[in-house]
Image: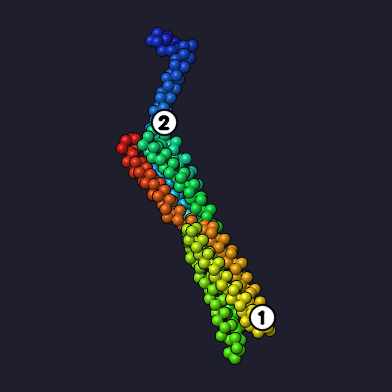
């Protein structure tokens, strides 16, 4: 019976051990083809399923990094110490680098998804951000110098100290009211101090001025005031008693110190880094910031309308 059954199976066409090899190989090729087809079909679905959420996340990162970069740069311009300016400038640069990294990561994803409009908006933002970043670097380089702030500190510090020392030295020259030249000497001393105070008063508008022509006019007035102080000192030397002339010479020293400090103040003020960085921030940078933000807004809105199926 067993022998008969085996003969029967051979007669009904079941494959023998010798003929099974080609059949198995054929089945393996069919399965492999199905796997390849399924894998290829799956790859076409992956961009919408996985890359769209990633594109939306990266577009949000762009907004966050750009906002932080702009805010830090503004703080660097407005900071009242060198350390604060440098720290904010470093923060602005780091966030600008974050913007660039997010944009670089987003670009190939949009291309893979076939999102032409979003890719165009990203390209538009990239061009505007390039202009923004170039200007921002100029602004930050100016901001961290803080030349106007340093000039102001000298005006309120070393210049004020030497001016007070000069006033005290000049007033010490004034003799008692019994001296025959009392009123003339007192008037010359007052004139010298008044011209010195004029020099001090002119420092503040010079430091704040944005126009070179305005600074030049202020410096001309300073030159006149300095000449008035030196003329008064010469007349004092001739008017005071012989024994007091040394005191007038001693009063000249703090004035010379004041003028050296004043020259440094003018040099720092002429560089005008704080005023220039603020002007650039409020004007050109403000326009570029608005343009970048508009591109990012439109990019995010376009991506928000996309669905997993790739349609709007």
Q: Quarter holding the N terminus?
A: top left
Determine which of the numbered discs, if any, sits on residue 134 in the image.
Answer: none
Q: Position of residue 241 (x, y in %)?
A: 65, 84
Query: Measuring 56% from the left and 64% from the top, which residue is drawn there?
Result: 265
Judge whether 20 appears above or below 187 on screen.
Answer: above
Judge whether 67 appears above or below 163 on screen.
Answer: above
**Mark 2 surroundings within 10 Å by alpha-carbon count, few (fewer than 14), some (14 through 19), many (20 or more):** few
Which residue does the numbered mark 1 point to in the structure image? 245
Side of 61 where 159 appears, left or right? right
Which residue does the numbered mark 2 point to in the structure image? 43
Q: Quick one: SS at disc 1? A: helix
Judge whether 10 appears above or below 195 on screen.
Answer: above
Q: Is residue 170 visible?
A: yes
- Nearest the eye: 198 or 57: 198
Q: Position of residue 291 (x, y in %)?
A: 39, 47
Q: Position of residue 275 (x, y in %)?
A: 48, 59
Q: Residue furthest bottom?
A: 178
> Disc 1 to disc 2, how far (Cα)?
98 Å
């Amino acid at each position: 019976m067993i022998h008969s059954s085996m003969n029967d199976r051979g007669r009904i066409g079941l494959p023998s051990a010798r003929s099974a090899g080609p059949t198995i190989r054929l089945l393996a090729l069919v399965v492999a083809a199905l796997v390849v087809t399924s894998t290829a079909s799956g790859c076409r679905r992956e961009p919408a399923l996985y890359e769209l959420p990633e594109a939306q996340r990266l577009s949000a990162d762009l907004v966050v990094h750009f906002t932080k970069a702009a805010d830090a740069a503004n703080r660097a311009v407005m900071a009242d110490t060198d350390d604060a300016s440098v720290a904010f400038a470093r923060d602005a640069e780091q966030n600008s680098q974050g913007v660039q990294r997010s944009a670089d990561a987003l670009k190939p994803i949009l291309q893979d998804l076939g999102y032409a409009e979003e890719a165009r908006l990203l390209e538009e933002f990239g061009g505007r951000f390039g202009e923004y970043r170039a200007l921002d670097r100029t602004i930050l380089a100016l901001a961290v110098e803080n030349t106007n702030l340093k000039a102001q500190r000298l005006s309120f510090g070393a210049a004020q100290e030497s001016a007070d020392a000069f006033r005290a030295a000049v007033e010490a020259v004034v003799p008692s009211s019994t001296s025959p030249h009392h009123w003339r000497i007192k008037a010359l001393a007052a004139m010298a101090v008044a011209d010195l105070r004029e020099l001090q008063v002119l420092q503040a508008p010079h430091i704040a001025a944005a126009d070179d022509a305005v600074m030049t006019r202020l410096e001309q007035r300073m030159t006149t005031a300095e000449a008035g102080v030196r003329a008064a000192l010469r007349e004092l030397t001739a008017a005071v008693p012989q024994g007091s002339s040394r005191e007038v010479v001693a009063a000249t020293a703090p004035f010379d110190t004041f003028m050296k400090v004043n020259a440094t103040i003018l040099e720092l003020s002429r560089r005008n880094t704080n005023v220039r960085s603020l002007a650039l921030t409020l004007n050109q940078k403000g326009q570029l910031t608005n343009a970048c933000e508009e591109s990012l807004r439109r990019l995010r809105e376009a991506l928000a309308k996309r669905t997993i199926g790739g349609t709007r």
